[in-house]
């Protein structure tokens, strides 16, 4: 029997400055534009993440709401959050984005999904379906936006 990997990631170099890439990630209102899982519907403007402990709210495609608590943050370099249903404890999964400038116009971005602490058994099928290819789809969409300056099409 094969062992399931509970930490998956994908990396991609993006032909855009790190600050442009990070701005798209740290602003929840921008996230539905590059979500490769096609899971996010919308987030209200004005929720730009600035520190550990910040909470932003996202509406999913099916209409449910998630509160996302930022657990790792370094401006321009790192952001990670744990989603939860409002009024409930976080089920234990984490989304992480690492942004590393290569030079003034190129950035290496690593997107990680970590479900090593996931306790909600009903979420296991979805967690298992979150593959490096799914993460790479988000990176591809993020690259298209960042490389075009992040301007709305």
Image (cartoon, helix red, strand yellow):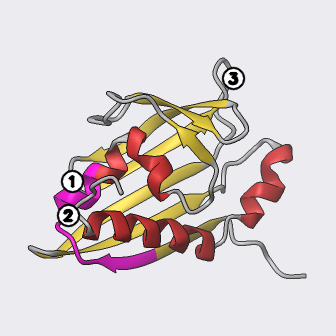
Label pair 1/2, CB-CB below 8 angstroms:
yes
Q: Which residue is mark 1?
A: 76
Nearest-to-viewer mark from 2 and 3: 2
Rounded to the nearest angstrom, the CA distance separating label 1 from label 2 is 7 Å
The residue shown at (34%, 42%) is: 27
The residue stretch that appears in magenta: 11-23
Count residues near mark 3 (Cα–Cα under 10 Å), then give few for <14, some for 14-19, many for 20+.
few
Above or below for 7 versus 43:
below
The residue nearer to you, when weighing 153 against 41, is: 153
Residue at 69% in and 72% down: 5
Secondary structure beneath label 1: loop
Quadrant containing the N terminus is bottom right
Residue positioned 26% across, 35% down in the render:
50
Locate residue 114 relative to residue 15 in the image: left or right.
Answer: right
Q: Is residue 106 above or below residue 19?
A: below
Circle 3 SS class: loop
Q: Quadrant of residue 96?
A: bottom left
- With 10 as the anchor, is 143 left or right in this view? left
Q: Is residue 19 left or right of residue 146?
A: left
Q: Earlier in the sequence, mark 2 or mark 3?
A: 2
Which comes before the other along the chain, label 3 or label 1?
1
What is the C-alpha distance between the residues marked 3 and 1? 30 Å
Residue located beneath label 2 in the image: 18
Which is more foreground, mark 1 or mark 2?
A: 2
Mark 3–mark 1 CB contact (< 8 Å): no
Q: Secondary structure at mark 2?
A: helix
Name the outermost residue toward the left.
104
Q: Residue furthest top?
A: 87
Near-viewer residue (70 or 29): 29
Residue carrying label 3? 88
Question: Vertically, is 103 above or below 30?
Answer: below
């Amino acid at each position: 029997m094969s062992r399931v990997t509970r930490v998956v990631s994908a990396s991609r170099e993006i032909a855009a400055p790190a600050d442009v890439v990070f701005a798209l990630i740290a602003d929840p209102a921008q996230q539905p534009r590059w979500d490769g899982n096609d899971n996010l519907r919308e987030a209200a403007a004005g929720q730009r993440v600035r520190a550990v402990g910040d909470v932003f709210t996202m509406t999913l495609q099916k209409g449910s709401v998630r509160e996302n608590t930022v657990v790792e943050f370094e401006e321009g370099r790192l952001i990670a959050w744990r989603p939860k249903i409002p009024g409930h404890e976080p089920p234990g999964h984490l989304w992480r984005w690492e942004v590393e400038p290569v030079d003034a116009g190129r950035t290496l971005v690593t997107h990680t999904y970590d479900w090593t602490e996931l306790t909600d058994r009903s979420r296991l099928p979805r967690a298992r379906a979150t593959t490096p290819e799914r993460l790479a789809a988000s990176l591809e969409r993020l690259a298209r936006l960042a490389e075009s300056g992040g301007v709305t099409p």
